[in-house]
Amino acid sequence: MANPKRRQSKERQRKRQGANRWRAPVLKTCPECGSSVPGHVACPSCGYYRNRQVLTVEASE
């Protein structure tokens, strides 16, 4: 079995573990209806994505 020659420093260990930290999701505002939408996703309330209608959304009133 292969064994490490040297112990990894605490700095390297922390750099490696820092990549796994939790990040809050980034929400954008839809230019058409103004609701909060995650990036790179069509707006579920109006159906627009990049200033184009890509989904047909039924009115839920």
Image (cartoon, rainbow, N blue to C red):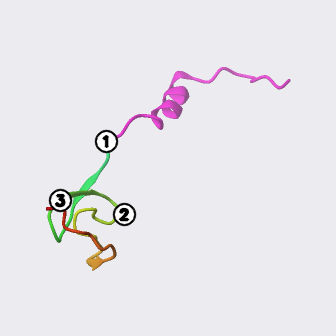
Q: Which residue is mark 3?
A: 35
Q: Identify the amino acid type marked 2.
A: His
* 22 is higher (above) or lower (below) than 57: above
- Residue 54, x across and y down, in percent: 34, 76
Tell me the quarter of the image containing the C terminus. Answer: bottom left
Look at mark 1 in the image and give the residue it sits on.
24
Quadrant holding the N terminus = top right
42 above or below 23? below
Classify mark 3: residues with Cα within 10 Å, few (<14), some (14-19) or many (20+). Answer: some
**Element assignment for label 1:** loop
- Residue at point 36% right, 63% down? 40
Lower sequence index among marks 1 and 2: 1
Whether residue 6 is in magenta: the answer is: yes
Q: Which residues are magenta?
A: 1-24
Tag 2 and tag 3, C-beta contact below 8 Å: no
Depth check: give the residue in front, 35 or 46. Answer: 46
In terms of depth relative to the viewer, which is nearer, 40 or 46?
46
Q: Nearer the viewer, mark 3 or mark 1?
A: 3
Label 2 sits on residue = 40
